[in-house]
Image (cartoon, rainbow, N blue to C red):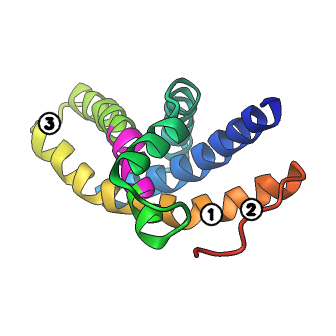
């Protein structure tokens, strides 16, 4: 049981770093403004939010419960898509809302007159598919790494 908690912690950290890095980069590039300082601030705030979600929300329990209720078999491509979708729904909107809100406040403090909801809508339209693809692609890679590091036999492929 302790080993499973360690694996979950390591997955939270790896996925948090990867999602925060990529979503911060995507957000800044889609806004058309990139600065190193802006990226670092965005990355750190996003990472903190991501880690908080990861440690507070029992994502594995939620996805296992939902997959079980839907009769989805483990490690099948459809199941992986559904799990990535659920993870994306849990992580990406929170991170996106916080990041857009921070950027909106910063822009309006400097005199910009931009509407919040269209800004948020555009950000969600961009970040949700990016988050889904990242989660779908990185989760199995990180699982294999974490399993091997903890002496657990990883799954070879989707059955």
- Classify the position of the C terminus by image quarter: bottom right
Residue occupying the point 53% across, 23% down? 56
**Numbered label attached to residue 144:** 2
Tell me which segment is drawn in magenta: 83-93
Q: Give the secondary structure at mark 2.
A: helix
Give the percent coordinates (x, y) of residue 152: 84, 53
Give the percent coordinates (x, y) of residue 36: 55, 49
Chain-order first, disc 3 or disc 2: 3
Residue occupying the point 54% across, 26% down? 52
In front: label 1 or label 3: 1
- Classify the position of the N terminus by image quarter: top right
In three-dimensional space, the C-alpha distance between marks 1 and 3, rounded to whole angstroms, equals 36 Å
User: How many labels sit on residues?
Assistant: 3
Q: Is residue 53 magenta?
A: no
Give the percent coordinates (x, y) of residue 101: 28, 31
Q: Nearer the viewer, residue 42 or 114?
A: 42
Residue occupying the point 49% across, 28% down? 57
Q: Is residue 58 shown left or right of residue 78?
A: right
Give the percent coordinates (x, y) of residue 29: 38, 60
Image-quadrant location for residue 120: top left
Residue annotated with mark 1 = 140
The vertical placement of 129 against 40, above or below, is below
Q: Is residue 130 shown left or right of residue 22?
A: left
Q: Nearer the viewer, residue 115 or 66?
A: 66
The vertical placement of 75 against 69, above or below, is below
Q: Is residue 85 magenta?
A: yes
**Numbered label attached to residue 116:** 3
Mark 2–mark 1 CB contact (< 8 Å) = yes
Report the magenta stretch's main SS: helix
Q: Give the secondary structure at mark 1.
A: helix
In front: label 3 or label 2: 2
Mark 1–mark 3 CB contact (< 8 Å) = no
């Amino acid at each position: 049981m302790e080993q499973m908690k360690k694996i979950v912690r390591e997955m939270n950290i790896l996925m948090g770093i990867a999602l925060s890095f990529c979503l911060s980069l995507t957000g800044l590039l889609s806004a058309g403004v990139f600065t190193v300082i802006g990226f670092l601030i965005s990355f750190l705030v996003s990472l903190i939010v991501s880690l908080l979600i990861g440690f507070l929300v029992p994502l594995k329990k939620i996805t296992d419960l939902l997959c079980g209720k839907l009769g989805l078999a483990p490690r099948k491509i459809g199941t992986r898509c559904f799990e990535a979708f659920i993870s994306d729904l849990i992580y990406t909107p929170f991170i996106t809302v916080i990041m857009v809100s921070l950027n909106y406040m910063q822009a309006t403090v400097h005199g910009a007159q931009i509407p919040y909801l269209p800004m948020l809508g555009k950000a969600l339209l961009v970040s949700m598919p990016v988050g889904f693809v990242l989660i779908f692609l990185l989760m199995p890679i990180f699982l294999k790494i974490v399993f091997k590091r903890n002496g657990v036999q990883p799954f070879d492929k989707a059955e």
